[in-house]
Image (cartoon, rainbow, N blue to C red):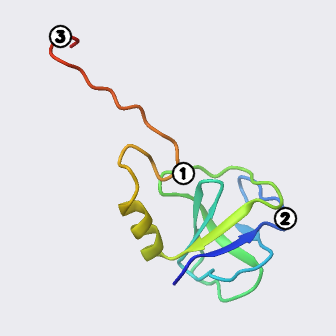
């Protein structure tokens, strides 16, 4: 399945278990929704509609509030795996970098 893109039509609180989107093209049960770096799994019972049930804070990301009109990307597991394989290992899935420190024999 190819990626689909949309926007939130309603703000989303950190504890919300569903998101409301302008278009759900590309959304599928057990697929992923990504908003501002937060990865969410789409609920297994989702069939269609603009209210999408989600399980928040997946893949090492945290559930936090998102404003109305925030960008939403829908992706399948294979889309996520392909993207992860191309990502530099020093960056987490949430897009936050982790410092890489190395020491020489003199600086240890």
Q: What element carries label 2?
A: loop
Which one is closest to the eye, mark 3 or mark 1? 3
Gap in angstroms between the C-alphas marked 3 and 1: 37 Å
Residue drawn where x is 57% and y is 76% of the image: 3
In the picture, the disc for residue 10 is: 2
Residue drawn where x is 48% and y is 53% of the image: 93
Q: Which of pointers 2 and 1 lies earlier in the amino acid sequence? A: 2
Extreme residue toward the left, this view: 105
Q: Residues within 10 Å of mark 3 (few under 14, many from 20)?
A: few
Q: What element carries label 3?
A: loop
Q: Position of residue 62 (x, y in %)?
A: 58, 49
> In this image, 3 relative to 25: left or right?
left
Q: Where is residue 106 in the image (x, y as percent from the top left)?
A: 17, 10
Residue drawn where x is 46% and y is 68% of the image: 80
Tell me, yes or no, whether the two marked residues, 3 and 1, touch with CB atoms within 8 Å: no
Residue nearest the viewer, comparing 102 with 63 = 102
Extreme residue toward the top, this view: 106
Gap in angstroms between the C-alphas marked 3 and 2: 56 Å
Residue 90: which quarter of the image? Answer: top left
Residue drawn where x is 65% and y is 89% of the image: 47
Q: How many labels does the image show?
A: 3
Q: Residues within 10 Å of mark 1 (few under 14, many from 20)?
A: some
In the picture, the disc for residue 61 is: 1
In the picture, the disc for residue 106 is: 3
Q: Which of pointers 3 and 1 lies earlier in the amino acid sequence? A: 1
Q: Residues within 10 Å of mark 2 (few under 14, many from 20)?
A: some
Tell me, yes or no, whether the two marked residues, 2 and 1, touch with CB atoms within 8 Å: no
Q: Which of pointers 3 and 2 lies earlier in the amino acid sequence? A: 2
């Amino acid at each position: 399945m190819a990626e689909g893109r949309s926007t939130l039509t309603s703000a989303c609180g950190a504890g919300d278990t569903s998101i409301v989107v302008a278009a759900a093209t590309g959304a599928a049960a057990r697929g992923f929704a990504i908003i501002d770096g937060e990865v969410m799994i789409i609920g297994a019972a989702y069939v269609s509609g603009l209210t999408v049930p989600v399980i928040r804070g997946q893949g090492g990301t945290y559930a936090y509030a998102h404003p109305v009109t925030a960008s939403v990307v829908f992706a399948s597991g294979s889309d996520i795996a392909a993207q992860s394989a191309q990502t530099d290992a020093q960056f987490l899935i949430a897009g936050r970098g982790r410092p890489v420190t190395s020491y020489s024999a003199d600086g240890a």
